[in-house]
Image (cartoon, grey):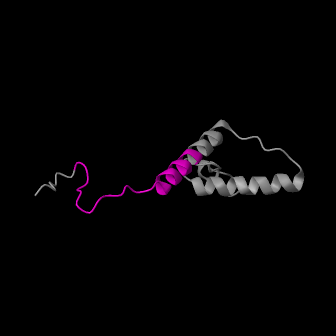
Amino acid sequence: MEGHATDGDHADPFPTGDHPGQLRNLQILSEITAEKNSTIVFPAQFLESARALSRFVEGKTRHTTAPLPRLDPGEAPAGSGISTAT
């Protein structure tokens, strides 16, 4: 059946778990609206995905920038079970 679309042909424009794809779609939509002087209306599903991505990025940034604790040369890490007493 040529010329007829199937369910597989109409992919969700914002699939869950595809953050790079979602960001690319947002970039394309932004470019189109800038050219056409238009407004984009986002479905709630996209907004929740964008919030989740934002929380993920903020959490990843927060964990990677935290300073590591300094240990004295003769001190074992807490909870390691290693005794430093002589």
Residue under the image location 60 percent in, 57 percent down: 20
Residue 1 seen in this snapshot: no
Residue 65 seen in this snapshot: yes
Residue 12 in the figure: left or right of residue 85: right
Q: Residue 73: image x %, image y %?
A: 26, 63
Residue under the image location 48 percent in, 57 percent down: 64
Residue 20 in the figure: left or right of residue 32: left
Judged from this view, the residue extending furthest toward the left is: 86
Residue under the image location 59 percent in, 51 percent down: 8
Q: Residue 31: image x %, image y %?
A: 80, 57
Residue 31 in the figure: left or right of residue 5: right
Residue 32 in the figure: left or right of residue 59: right
Residue under the image location 63 percent in, 52 percent down: 22
Tell whether position 21 is magenta. no
Judged from this view, the residue extending furthest toward the top is: 44
> Which residues are drawn in magenta?
54-79
Tell whether position 76 is magenta. yes
